[in-house]
């Protein structure tokens, strides 16, 4: 799966689950400051990503995640390890 595929799916999740405006979503967008996601939203996003990837996503892997690009990188790395 490419980074573009992951970005498209993440964009879909952010719009559907958290009602984020598509115009606000960019790789540099900060999850908490720009997209207004809180810690509960982060847990929901991790659960959705687990469902999407079929892989366990640990909260430790996401401790350093701050931007949309960070999420894409983490999911891409997770899927690359699985391959």
Image: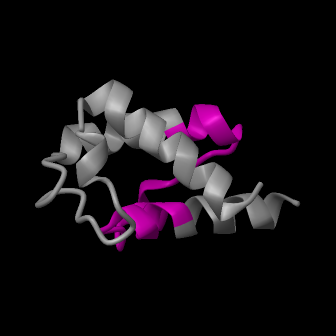
Where residue 70 sits in the image (x, y, percent)? 43, 70
Q: Nearer the viewer, residue 32 or 9?
A: 9
Where residue 72 sits in the image (x, y, percent)? 52, 62
Colouring rule applied to residues = one colour
Q: Nearer the viewer, residue 72 or 61?
A: 72
Residue extent of the magenta highlight: 49-72
On screen, 39 above or below 33? above
Q: Residue furthest front?
A: 23
Q: Residue at x 20, y 47 (%)?
A: 39
Residue 77 placement: quadrant: bottom right
Q: Residue furthest right?
A: 83
Q: Residue at x 11, y 61 (%)?
A: 33
Residue 83 placement: quadrant: bottom right
Horizontally, is 50 left or right of 66 in the view?
right
Q: Residue at x 77, y 54 (%)?
A: 1
Horizontally, is 75 left or right of 28 in the view?
right
On screen, 18 above or below 59? above
Q: Residue at x 16, y 46 (%)?
A: 38
On screen, 77 above or below 42? below
Where residue 34 sits in the image (x, y, percent)? 15, 58
Horizontally, is 62 left or right of 67 in the view?
right
Q: Is residue 34 magenta?
A: no
């Amino acid at each position: 799966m490419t980074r573009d595929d992951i970005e498209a799916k993440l964009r879909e999740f952010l719009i559907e689950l958290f009602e984020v405006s598509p115009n606000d979503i960019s790789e540099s967008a900060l999850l908490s400051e720009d997209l207004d996601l809180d810690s509960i939203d982060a847990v929901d996003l991790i659960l959705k990503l687990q469902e999407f990837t079929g892989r366990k996503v640990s909260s430790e892997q996401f401790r350093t995640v701050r931007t949309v690009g960070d999420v894409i990188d983490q999911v891409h790395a997770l899927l690359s390890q699985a391959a």
